[in-house]
Image (cartoon, coloured by chain):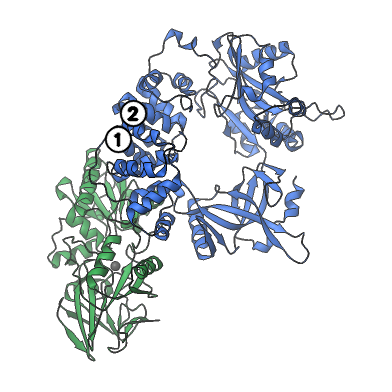
Amino acid sequence: MELIVARPEGLYCPPGDFYIDPWRPVDRAVITHAHGDHARRGNRHYLAATPGAGILRARLGEDIDLQTLPYGTPLEHHGVTLSFHPAGHVLGSAQVRLAYRGEVWVASGDYKVGPDGTCEAFEPVRCHTFISESTFGLPIYRWQDQACIFADIDAWWRANAAAGRPSVLFAYAFGKAQRILHGIDASIGPVLVHGAVEPLNQVYRAAGVRLPETLPATATSKGDPLLRQALVLAPPSAGGSTWMRRFGDYSDAFASGWMLLRGARRRRGVDRGFVLSDHADWPGLLWAIEQSGAERVMVTHGQVNVLVRYLTERGLDARAFQTEYGEEDDSLEPTN
Amino acid sequence: MRAFAELYARLDATTSSNAKLAALQDYLADAPPADAAWAVYFLAGGRPRQVVPTRVLRDLAIRLCGLPEWLFEESYQAVGDFAETLSLLLPESTQVADESLQWWLEQLLPLRGLPPEELAPRLQALWTRLDRQSLMVSLKLLTGGFRVGVSKLLVTRALAALAGVDAKRVAQRMVGYTDLAHQPTPQRYLALIAQESAEEHAQRGGQPYPFFLAHPLQEPLERFDAVLGPPQQWLVEWKWDGIRAQLVKRDGRAWLWSRGEELITERFPELAQLAAALPDGTVLDGELVIWKAPPDSDEQAFGVQPFALLQQRIGRKTLGKKLLDELPAALLAYDLLEWQGEDWRSRSQDQRRAQLEALVGSIGDARLRLSPRVTGDDWQALARQREASRQLGVEGMMLKRRDSLYGVGRTRDLGLWWKWKIDPFSIDAVLIYAQRGHGRRASLYSDYTFAVWDDSAPGERVLVPFAKAYSGLTDEEMRKVDAIVRRTTVDKFGPVRSVTPTLVFELGFEGIALSKRHKSGIAVRFPRMLRWRTDKTIEQADTLATLQGLL
Ligand SMILES: [Zn+2]
Ligand SMILES: [Zn+2]
């Protein structure tokens, strides 16, 4: 029995008559996490893991019809038992476990297997069929321990501060930015943030995640001595905009898994690239798939063909799922 | 090794020459001379022959990573750089050490020629001692693919700053430093940065001077007066389509050097012979060409022959009498760098030219010719003469400031030379194959093969490839083309993709000749993309007949 099939509207559960992360408006949408390509506007009814409620409301509107469910708590609907389990991707991100007449499927959304302190760590869930993303589905992608990356960011910031130069770090506003804030040594200098980042910081703080004090970058103007020691967190879209003018002579960097490759770093045109991703690396993908115990794996957005072929050669029943994910967070290599 | 790998990363991460210069100076200031000797060698373009064949490295890496071959290829496709791919795929090192660059070269260079079964254990043991960054750099050294976007001039400037010696002097000492013949040693490095001594000039043997290079002049004619002043301030010559060369005569011996600092005396015995008549302590700068006296009827024409004929001469190892008769070489002299044993580079262009004219006149040998002056009352008059460039077999004009000293490479502080080239040939061609680029463009499809229509077969129009080009597009355009290539891929052959033809580009090139080695029967020189013709469909691209018409 197929518990999840790909339909033009999104991933659909026929016995339960609901969708998971639909990309077209539907009646019932189960949401894995609040990145824009997975959680879209216009659905009648939303179901999400409790820790993700704040972000979903902040992004989709306070007035959405949202039902929440704590991690690990079962909910029955048309005979399908649904539960959420941490995916370790961003605050509130969940794998969706579906059980129906003895058959178990897990749709993992986006996931990362290492813990990062800003959201519940990934929890392997046993199942018959596992739906996996494949953003970094090539063996070249192996992440370093995040402590090393934060040490690199701190060292870069410290050197810039010593030279009296602002450190502008581009990172996705939801998830990556908070993870960086949580990981850096805030004693180095003041931390300024772009207007797109701060509302999400507040949701993280409200959820009990420790973030250092942040100031709006707009409170400063060019020549402000504060800037010379500051770390500035901004979404990639702020690069090259007039908003950047206040920073004068600054050093810039970009934090993303894509920064692993020299070519991508050069195309970004920033001084530094920090390899920090909210997605599983190659060993992480293989580990999660193995831990699920699934005999069947459905591969979505990223290196679909590579992962399907690799898993097939290792004796699994692996297939591709056409989806429309991978447009808002760092599932897609940034091109500008 | 780590310091050198870090230098590589710093150089690789920036396009600013100031930042590169700072990185070089930081490295050289701290590096032990034995390491600096090798670093300068590689950065200035030194290339030891490939130590280990890429194929062997690839097979070994696949085995060590435990990956299927296709997955290695997929990874390579995503990264676009062989050494980088390997450094990302090989198991993370467990016992990182930090031996010197020199130590590493002592381990790596002797691996050349070893059979694969002996290479494997040795490489595996060596690789465990390197972090990723160092591993990548060492792989680049092994494969002979070390390139990092630093010019020899920049290395020279860094050394000059470090030594507190004039950059021209350092450039002089750098000549021959990257020869395969002798390895870099601490002694040779220290000689690069030594204080100047009185004997230095006397001990130079057959060494040439670093060539002074011209900048392209891209101003419209109306701006010439504003930018250049009146033409009377300039020495104007034709721009010859040959090989830039220096003829050195010292201590009764002659040396002929090409611009790549390659010694080519033996390939041109007639010029070595001619040099016998030159006084000792003479260095001429000029253009090496094949020259045949033009028919008397044609007073306008020069005797300079197409570049393709000169290439035939260079390609030959043995030079029979017949070849020397058929393709006689001559030196079109345009500068005098040393006279009576004295370095004349700090004298003005005018002074050097006057002495050169006197010298060439006194020799009276048809193999040594003066590159003639071109005169005109104003820039318009010169522009009119320049229109005859193609008939004359030249590439346009050279403008040299009459008060110019003879600089080093592309410096502009001592003097200024402009090359005022004629517009290149151009043709609208269709993109049919794309390949990943190198370095900065390694993950983009940036190298293209272009075709024109062959209408000669009745009823069927086919596209025949005739040129490859990889420069001329902006980064933005390149990204767009890259996306289209990926979308329209028909087939993949290794790093090359064939595409459904949809894109038309205007290609510019400098020369065109018949060629048996090309499918189209035509070879073009220095092809590059002038612009993306988004306004044209592929049917509107040019034909082979148009191309042949340019011959
Ligand atoms: Zn996501
Ligand atoms: Zn995603």
* Labels 2 and 1 within one chain: yes
The answer to whether residue A28 shows anywhere in this view is: yes
The answer for which chain carries disc 2 is: B
Distance of label 2 from label 1 (alpha carbons)? 10 Å
**Rendered location of residue B323, percent (x, y):** 74, 29
Q: Helix, strand, or loop for circle 2? A: helix
The residue lying toward the viewer, choosing from B271 and A263, is B271
**Rendered location of residue B179, percent (x, y):** 49, 27
Q: Quadrant of the C terminus of chain B?
A: top right
Q: Which chain is blue?
A: B
Q: Residue A117 has which mark?
A: none
Q: Quadrant of the N terminus of chain B?
A: top left
Q: Residue at horizontal 50%, vertical 14%?
A: B204
The answer for which chain carries disc 1 is: B
List the residue tagged with mark 2: B35
Q: Amino acid at mark 1?
A: Ala
Ligand 1 within 8 Å of disc 2? The answer is no
Q: Amino acid at mark 2?
A: Asp
Q: Are marks 2 and 1 in contact (CB under 8 Å)?
A: yes
In the image, is residue A152 above or below residue A85?
above
Q: Quadrant of ligand 1?
A: bottom left
The residue lying toward the viewer, choosing from B84 and A66, is B84
Q: Helix, strand, or loop for circle 1? A: helix
Residue most toward the bottom? A78
Q: Residue at horizontal 47%, vertical 54%?
A: B444
List the residue tagged with mark 1: B3
Of the residues under marks 2 and 1, which one precedes in the sequence?
1
